[in-house]
């Protein structure tokens, strides 16, 4: 990461509300969050380890993050700061920072459910979350909890599509496994003027056979010709993926 990029991240964190009592403040709030953030990126999973890591790199971190004291923050200080900050504000600040490094050309992200081994719910059970991961910039764009039998992964994704695309306007394509190959979700993605690429398994035999039939006569040359024709007609796709009516093939022309 360049110095300019690090400075801009620190500036973004500086916009978060400092919830601490002004009396007795010893370290800048943005600096504490930045140290914790970078410590986690370096795969240090607890505050004691992050504090030791910060002590080892303190001359660099102190100058970069605006600390004035000679000693590193204690692990308890880091944990208290992390427990008080606004997650919503942090997400907004991080998103604003990352969007400056994303190219204007469209890119794709994969959706998949994961069970966190470190984050636990109130009952002490691991939290199952739905992740949206952008391979181009190698960043998890968003994650939402899934569980309690109230909503499935496709339903959670469908409920958050609007905020996802508003936060990441360059995100144009979502990819997912066969679990996400559902008509309501596909229609919702199309309604947001985005595309999708979803897997289809044999447990959807009618859809699977329809796709095989639709693409039986398709060739790479035919696909290129169709794309050129549509571009010439200023055709704008509403979506792509596993639903056969969204495809135009030589057999249907």
Image (spheres, rainbow, N blue to C red):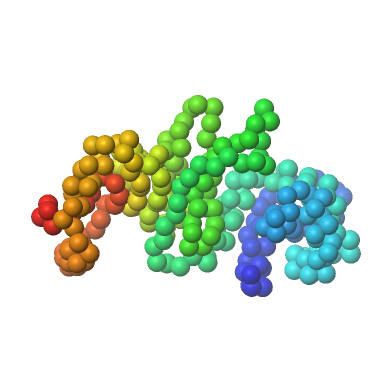
**Is residue 234 depicted above or below 131 in this figure?**
below
How many marks on residues? 0
Q: Is residue 84 left or right of residue 8?
A: right
Q: Is residue 104 left or right of residue 126?
A: left
The x and y percentages for residue 184 are 32, 37
**Foreground residue among 237 and 176:** 176
**Is residue 103 depicted above or below 236 in this figure?**
below
Rendered-image quadrant of the C terminus: bottom left
Rendered-image quadrant of the N terminus: bottom right
Instruction: Give the farthest residue toward the bottom.
Output: 3
The x and y percentages for residue 177 are 41, 45
The x and y percentages for residue 115 are 58, 40
Name the residue rendered at 68%, 50% in the picture: 17
Name the residue rendered at 83%, 64% in the picture: 56
**Foreground residue among 196 and 106:** 196
Instruction: Give the farthest residue toward the right.
Output: 70
The x and y percentages for residue 203 are 32, 35
Report if residue 191 is visible in the image.
no
**Foreground residue among 113 and 238:** 113
**Foreground residue among 33 and 154:** 154
Quarter assignment of residue 182: top left
Report if residue 236 is visible in the image.
yes
Name the residue rendered at 78%, 57% in the picture: 28
Name the residue rendered at 24%, 58% in the picture: 236
């Amino acid at each position: 990461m360049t110095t300019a990029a690090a400075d801009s991240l620190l500036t973004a964190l500086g916009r978060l509300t400092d919830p601490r009592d002004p009396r007795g403040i010893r370290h800048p709030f943005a600096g504490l969050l930045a140290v914790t953030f970078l410590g986690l990126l370096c795969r240090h999973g607890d505050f004691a380890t992050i504090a030791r890591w910060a002590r080892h790199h303190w001359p660099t971190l102190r100058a970069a993050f605006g600390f004035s004291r000679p000693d590193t923050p204690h692990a308890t200080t880091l944990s208290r700061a992390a427990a008080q900050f606004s997650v919503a504000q942090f997400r907004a600040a991080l998103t604003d920072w990352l969007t400056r490094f994303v190219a204007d050309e469209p890119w794709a992200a994969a959706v998949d459910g994961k069970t966190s081994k470190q984050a636990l719910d109130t009952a002490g059970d691991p939290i199952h979350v739905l992740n949206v991961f952008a391979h181009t910039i190698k960043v998890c764009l968003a994650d939402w909890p899934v569980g309690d039998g109230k909503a499935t992964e496709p339903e959670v994704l469908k409920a958050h599509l609007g905020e996802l695309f508003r936060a990441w306007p360059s995100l144009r394509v979502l990819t997912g496994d066969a679990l996400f190959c559902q008509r309501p979700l596909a229609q919702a993605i199309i309604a947001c003027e985005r595309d999708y690429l979803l897997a289809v398994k044999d447990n959807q035999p009618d859809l699977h056979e329809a796709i095989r039939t639709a693409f039986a006569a398709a060739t790479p040359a035919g696909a290129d010709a169709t794309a050129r024709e549509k571009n010439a007609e200023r055709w704008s796709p509403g979506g792509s993926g596993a639903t056969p009516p969204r495809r135009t093939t030589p057999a249907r022309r």
